[in-house]
Image (spheres, rainbow, N blue to C red):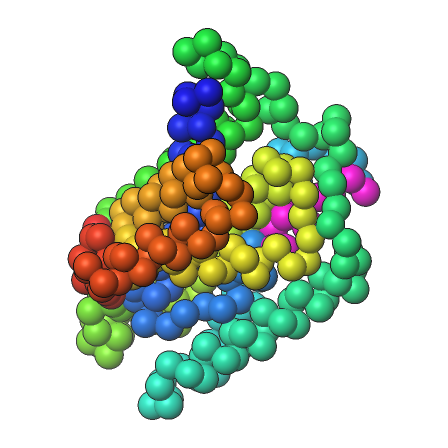
Amino acid sequence: MLSQQIINALSQGAFYALFAAGLTLIFGVLDILNMAHGAVFMWGAMLSWYLMSALGVNFGFALLITIVFCGLMGLLLEHAAFRPLRGRSSGHLPPLVSSLALSIVLVHVAEKIFGTRVVRYPDDAVPFAQSVEVGGVQVSLLHVVLLVVALVLMGALWYMVARTRLGRSIRALQENPKVARLMGVDVDRTIAWMFVIASVLAGIAGAFLGVAYNSASPYMGNWVDLKGFAVIILGGMGSIPGALLGGMLIGFAEIGTVVYLSSDYRDAAVFVVLMGMLLLKPSGLLGSSREVRA
């Protein structure tokens, strides 16, 4: 039983970390909150469900299409909600409101296409539905796969930021956009790539969470947005390792609350932990508020 709950907490925490990684990447470099991140996550889940249930494709192919679609959606977000406002000295509010408005549009479009009800995945289409035995306890293989996928993608994101040419451009942009441009960094293209990467991560998180819990709806992005913000505040805004650590802590807090108290208190437990962190270390567990660690 304990092994089961530890795996559940790890996979839940890894999912939160994967979702929050895109948020913290954008915030760490551009100092803006992308309120449409949850809508992209929702589209990842709904699109993969539609492909699997209506068109009968397998999960791997549905995930591939979802990745491409969410990457293009990230490009659209950057061009529609953020690029027109870039360079204007009007503060953080306009891009925040702009992304929130686009998020509402994306949810309404999903309602028109998929309906407003909670949908279930076809039983024979859910991958890794079987369980594996760990220490004498049956553990969902899908949760184990979700944990592995999230950790691999988080590691790949960290490597990209720390070791690749695009990562060097991102770090230069984080330090000073004007100087980065003078040094030859294509600022617009670098930012566009950041949104593509962040949206792909959100789409993958949506697709995996949808099949893991066998449910999806146009409104599922609302609650995960709040958890994502809690993760990046807890771990340290702008820190990729902090997103992983914060996600894991929230995962354990949620599962521990469900096991030892009640599922009714799981959200309250998360925000109690968050409030405690804000009182003890307002910058989060892993340091400064705007640093993307390499």
Quadrant of the image occupied by residue 34:
bottom left
Q: Is residue 50 magenta?
A: yes
Question: Is residue 153 something one can see in this rendering?
Answer: no
Question: Is residue 115 something one can see in this rendering?
Answer: yes
Give the vertical position of 276 relative to 139 (above or below).
below
Give the vertical position of 248 relative to 80 (above or below).
above
Q: Is residue 64 magenta?
A: no
Query: What residue is shown at x 63% (from left), y 27% (from top)?
Result: 127
Residue lying at the far top of the rendered structure = 136
Image: magenta residue range: 42-54
Task: Determine whether, in the image, residue 76 is placed left or right of residue 4.
Answer: right
Task: Determine whether, in the image, residue 269 is placed left or right of residue 55.
Answer: left
Give the vertical position of 51 relative to 130 (above or below).
below
Query: What residue is shown at x 19% (from left), y 59% (from top)?
Result: 280
Q: Position of residue 88 (x, y in %)?
A: 37, 89
Residue lying at the far bottom of the rendered structure = 89
Figure label count:
0
Q: Position of residue 292 (x, y in %)?
A: 25, 57
Query: What residue is shown at x 27% (from left), y 47% (from top)?
Result: 241
Q: Nearer the viewer, residue 130 or 80?
A: 130
Task: Determine whether, in the image, residue 112 is placed left or right of residue 26.
Answer: right
Q: Main secondary structure of the magenta part?
A: helix
Q: Position of residue 54 (x, y in %)?
A: 81, 42
Q: Position of residue 178 (x, y in %)?
A: 24, 79
Give the vertical position of 28 relative to 263 (above or below).
below
Query: What residue is shown at x 56% (from left), y 54% (from top)?
Result: 41
